Image: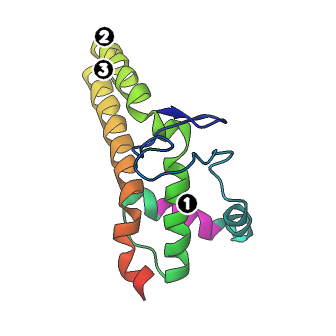
Amino acid sequence: MRWSGVRLVHSREPPAGVGGRDKVVPMTSAADPDFAAQWNSLDKGTRRQIRRLIRVGRPQENAENARFAVRFAAYQRTRPWSRYFWLWLLPLFVGGFYAGAQIHPIVIGVVGGLAANAVLVRWNFSRTPKVNAALLDS
């Protein structure tokens, strides 16, 4: 992690001046205003379908939706809930498991299922470009 002048940035890139990188570009916002305007211009059903197909890890129906899906998934990976995923998931899972053990075994299964779903959704956000590669190449 390094300080970029605006906020902490998680990066594997070397700091400024190391490895041929001249300067650190400050990150003011993860959202691209052009993409946000295009995304908001889509109808609600299309946005919902794109989000759902990303979460379950399925390819989109056409190339336009695939481009939106890749950009939307990239945006979601920059959100704090995604960047600090393991920091919030593990304590909630342990706490939920402990509470479920005190209440009923079915609650333990529900907690495990919710945690597994969260891990799969996170994994599918990172797989979106690969899943939609055939549509993006055409």
**Do labels 2 and 3 touch, CB within 8 Å?**
no
**Relative to residue 89, is residue 46 drawn left or right?**
right
Extreme residue toward the top, this view: 102
Q: Quadrant of residue 54?
A: bottom left
What whole-number distance in Å separates the C-alpha atoms at marks 3 and 1? 32 Å
Identify the secondary structure beneath mark 3. helix
**Relative to residue 55, is residue 45 drawn left or right?**
right
Q: Which mark is residue 102?
A: 2
At label 2, counting other C-alpha atoms closer than 10 Å, the crowd grade (few under 14, some 14-19, many 20 or more) is: few
Magenta stretch, overall SS: helix
Q: Which mark is residue 72?
A: 1
Residue at horizontal 40 percent and vertical 67 percent from the top: 129
**Do labels 3 and 1 touch, CB within 8 Å?**
no
Q: Amino acid at mark 2?
A: Gln
Name the N-terminal-most of marks 3 and 1.
1
Position of residue 103 measured from the top left corner of the image (x, y, whole percent):
33, 14
Q: Which residue is mark 3?
A: 97
What whole-number distance in Å separates the C-alpha atoms at marks 1 and 2? 40 Å
Name the N-terminal-most of marks 2 and 3.
3
Position of residue 10 measured from the top left corner of the image (x, y, whole percent):
47, 39
Q: Amino acid at mark 1?
A: Phe
- Mark in the foreground, 2 or 3: 3
Residue at horizontal 47 percent and vertical 40 percent from the top: 15
Examine the structure image and report whether residue 116 is included in the region drawn in magenta.
no
- Mark in the foreground, 1 or 2: 1
